[in-house]
Structure formats: C-alpha cells, structure tokens
Image (spheres, helix red, strand yellow):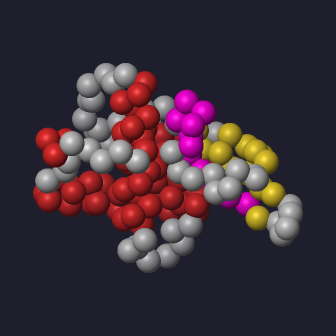
Amino acid sequence: MRRLPPERRLRPAERARFATEIVVAYARARRELGRAPIEQAVARLRASDDGAAAREPKTPGEEHDEARRVGRAVVLTMRFLPGDTRCLRRSAVTLRLLARRGIPARLVIGARTRPDFLAHAWVEHDGVPVLSPLDGSFGRLVEL
C-alpha cells in the first residue's frame, strides 16, 4: 500500500476519532451479527442511520485507495480489541465504515476443502479485495 503524502496523513486527534469509529462499528457489528441472519445484519450495517457526514465525491481510484486504508486501519485497530476479531467481524466492521463513507463494497464468504476445510470472509470494492482473501484458494459461497 502506498504511504499517504504528509499533507493527507491523519493527525493524532483524527487517528483517535477514527479508532473510536472502528470500536463503535465493532460493537454494532457484534450486536447485529449476534441477533439476525447474516443478510439482515449486513443490511443493517450498511444503513447510514447515525448521521454520517456527507463526503465529497471521489474517483474510482480514490475510492479504492480509501477503502484499502479503511481496511488496513480496521485490521490494525481490531488486533487490540477483546473478543472474536477474526475475518467475519473485521469484514463487517469494514463494510460498515465504507458504507458510512459512501463507498460501495461487498462482503464475500468463501470456503475451501483442501488440505483442510476452512471458511473465510473478506470485503471487495469493485471486485478488488479490500481485506485479504488469503491465498485465493477459497471458492465463493455467497456475496452480500
């Protein structure tokens, strides 16, 4: 990932606000994933009912760069949170934050059977992974 130029890097107070936004999104994702089927949980996480600020329109390249930065920040921040912070929760939080920014994204859930059965969830923007699909050996089961 490219490093942002100094004028676009977040200041400490902005980083703190962003980390807080991630923690709040994590709490909401935990609640939604625990109380509803995945389709409903994803729809609720995408709903911008909490007064998200209007964002300036972005080019597709700028949207993808921002989506990747959001995904990276989610992964880095969630390492310090208690509870289950594996791929489905990380993906739900990333989906929530991207929706708040007006960036369309899809949650992908896949599985593989060899060498052992393993399921994985990740987020894509315009068909390009924002969160890692690991080694790419996962067959897609569902896209939401």
Quarter of the rendering occupied by the C terminus: top right
User: Which residue is pictured at 43% across the width and 34% down the height?
Assistant: 64
Q: Is residue 131 above or below residue 76?
A: above
Q: Does the magenta stretch include residue 126?
A: yes
Magenta span: predominant SS is: strand
Residue closest to the eye, 130 or 78: 130
Quadrant of the image occupied by residue 7 = top left
Q: Position of residue 33 (x, y in %)?
A: 57, 58
| 11 displayed left or right of 78 | left
| 22 displayed left or right of 53 | right
Q: Where is residue 142 in the image (x, y as percent from the top left)?
A: 73, 43
Residue at far right of view: 114
Q: What stretch is highlighted in magenta?
A: 119-129
Using the rendered image of the protein, determine whether residue 104 is visible from the camera's viewpoint.
yes
Using the rendered image of the protein, determine whether residue 32 is visible from the camera's viewpoint.
no
| 6 displayed left or right of 116 | left
User: Which residue is pictured at 51% across the width and 45% down the height?
Assistant: 130
